[in-house]
Image (cartoon, rainbow, N blue to C red):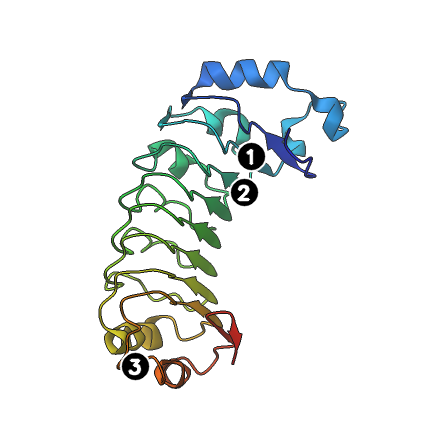
Amino acid sequence: MSVIIAGRFDIVNKKLVSVTDESLDAIIKEYDYSKDNNENKDLKFYHMLDIGGNMITSISLNSISKYFLHITELYLINNEFKEIPEEINNLVNLKKLYFSKNKLTKISNIDKLEKLEVIDFRANRITNLSGIENNLNLMSISISNNLVSNIDDIPKLLKLQSLFLFSSHIPNLESFLNILSTRCPNIEKLLIDSSTMINDSNKSTYKDLVKQALPKIKLLDYTKM
C-alpha cells in the first residue's frame, strides 16, 4: 500500500502496461478520494501524479493531459519505457519529472516543458545530455547510473545548481569541467564518484580541480567543500 502524500494522485503498483484515455477514465471513476480528504473528487486538488511501479511501455496522446494538464510533478519511476512518450510534452505545467529505473536510451519529448526545474533519469541507458536545449529553467539534473559518455550537448543552464552523474562513462575530467564552467557555472552540488573520469592520476587532486572550475560548489560527492 502506498504512503499517502498530500496532493498526490496515486496509481502506483497497479500492474498497468499502458496509459490510455480509457484506462485513466476507469481509474478516476473508481479512485478512493476519501483517503485524500477530497470529497468533491476534484482532480485539480492534485498537483502530483504518481504512476510508478507498473510495467508501462506507452502513454497515449491526450490521455494524461486530458485529466491532469495542471499537474506540476509527474512520477513514472520503475516502469518499462524505452522512450519518453510524446504525451509528456503536452504537460506544459510540469516542474518536476521523474523517469528513473526505466530503459530510456535518450532524452526526448520534453522540449515544450519550459517550466521544468527538476529531471530525474537515474538508472536508464542514456548516453548523452542532448534533448534539454529548451529546458533552461532546470535547477537539478539527476542522471546517475546511465551510459553517459559526454556532456557536449548540455546547453547553458545558468539556474542549474545540482548535477548528479554518479557512475558515468565520461573519459576526461578536464574537458568535462571546462564545459561545466562555461555553461553551468552556478552548480553547487556535483556527484561524479565512481565515474571513469576519476582515476589514479587525478583521484587526489580532482576536488581541487572541481573547486577551481566551479567556485560556487558546496557539495562534491557527498563531501562539503
Q: Residue at x 42, y 64 (%)?
A: 163
Q: Is residue 46 above or below residue 157?
A: above
Q: Is residue 51 above or below residue 41?
A: below
Is residue 29 toward the left or the right of residue 18 in the image? right
The residue at which mark 1 appears reads as 49
Quadrant in which the N terminus is drawn: top right
Q: Residue at x 47, y 14 (%)?
A: 22
Nearer the N terminus, badge 3 or badge 2? 2
Image location (x, y in percent) of residue 189: 48, 69
Is residue 38 toward the left or the right of residue 57 in the image? right
Is residue 12 toward the left or the right of residue 58 in the image? right
Crowding near the residue tagged with mark 2, few <14, some 14–19, many ≥20 C-alpha atoms within 10 Å:
many
Disc 3 residue type? Answer: Asn
Q: In which quarter of the image is residue 48?
A: top right
The residue at which mark 2 appears reads as 73
Is residue 1 toward the left or the right of residue 144 in the image? right
Which numbered mark, 1 or 3, is in the foreground of this view?
3
Nearer the N terminus, badge 1 or badge 3? 1
Q: Residue 90 carries which label?
A: none
Give the structural element (helix, strand or loop) at label 2: strand
Q: Which residue is drawn at 63% across and 27% down?
A: 43
| Circles 1, 2 touching at the beta carbon (< 8 Å) | yes
The residue at which mark 3 appears reads as 202
Q: Disc 3 to disc 2, how far (Cα)?
A: 39 Å
